[in-house]
Amino acid sequence: DVKVTQSSRYLVKRTGEKVFLECVQDMDHENMFWYRQDPGLGLRLIYFSYDVKMKEKGDIPEGYSVSREKKERFSLILESASTNQTSMYLCASSLPSGNQPQHFGDGTRLSIL
Amino acid sequence: ILNVEQSPQSLHVQEGDSTNFTCSFPSSNFYALHWYRWETAKSPEALFVMTLNGDEKKKGRISATLNTKEGYSYLYIKGSQPEDSATYLCAPANAGGTSYGKLTFGQGTILTVHP
């Protein structure tokens, strides 16, 4: 069975901290994605990677960076956490085509105090 | 950023009712349309990926249709059950370039099925 694993289900951090969210997939997928979900706004794409060390900004990249050093792992980094980054974060992976479904992790509910 | 609209925002139905909701998206540069179901405390799960105008897909009591020329898709649930309660998300994929595979999600339709 396919698996996308996010490192934490719940996370509480303080304003100004550097925060790392980790995502690992076991399907050998080229594409990996980070989204955030806020009430009434659906899933919004933060960053997208289509290959190792390759990344592309999504719709809301400000305040975030990403790292993809290995194919199976995609990390989201909050450089200096702020309260408006309190949200549900979802990682997904897919084969390299828009006609392939994305497979999601269980999400990380991040609270910035 | 693509403009993707889903309606209604939320829906309450009784067990056994049939229901449907709509996803509207830009028809230009269309490549594929995805539907996902997201149950509370679980991860979003792919229902359908549709690519051809007039396409119709079915999975049990759930089906979907696609009109790429006018930019809309319908999701139908026949004989709703409480376990169908979830948020249903649609997401078009556009063709071309390094954005290949990138989806833009609508805000979702929240379905609640009452026993």
Image (cartoon, rainbow, N blue to C red):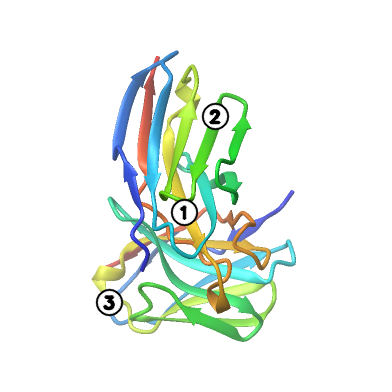
Mark 2 touches mark 3? (CB < 8 Å): no
**CA–CA distance in space, label 1 to label 2:** 17 Å
**CA–CA distance in space, label 3 to label 1:** 33 Å
Secondary structure beneath dot 3 equals: loop
- Residue B26 vs residue B90, the one in the foreground: B26
Secondary structure beneath dot 2 equals: strand
Tell me which residue sits at (45%, 13%) in the image.
Answer: B16
Secondary structure beneath dot 1 equals: strand
Q: Give the label on residue B91, or none.
A: 1
Left or right: B54 as drawn, with respect to A81: right
Q: Give the label on residue A15, or none.
A: 3
Residue count near mark 3 (Cα–Cα under 10 Å), binned few <14, some 14–19, many ≥20: some
Percent x, y for residue A55? 54, 82
Tell me which residue sits at (66%, 82%) in the image.
Answer: A52
Question: In which quarter of the view is residue A80 placed?
Answer: bottom left
Q: Is any part of residue A22 visible from this angle?
A: yes
Percent x, y for residue A8? 51, 61
The amino acid pointed to by label 3 is Thr
Tell me which residue sits at (62%, 26%) in the image.
Answer: B60
Q: Chain of mark 1?
A: B
The amino acid pointed to by label 2 is Ile
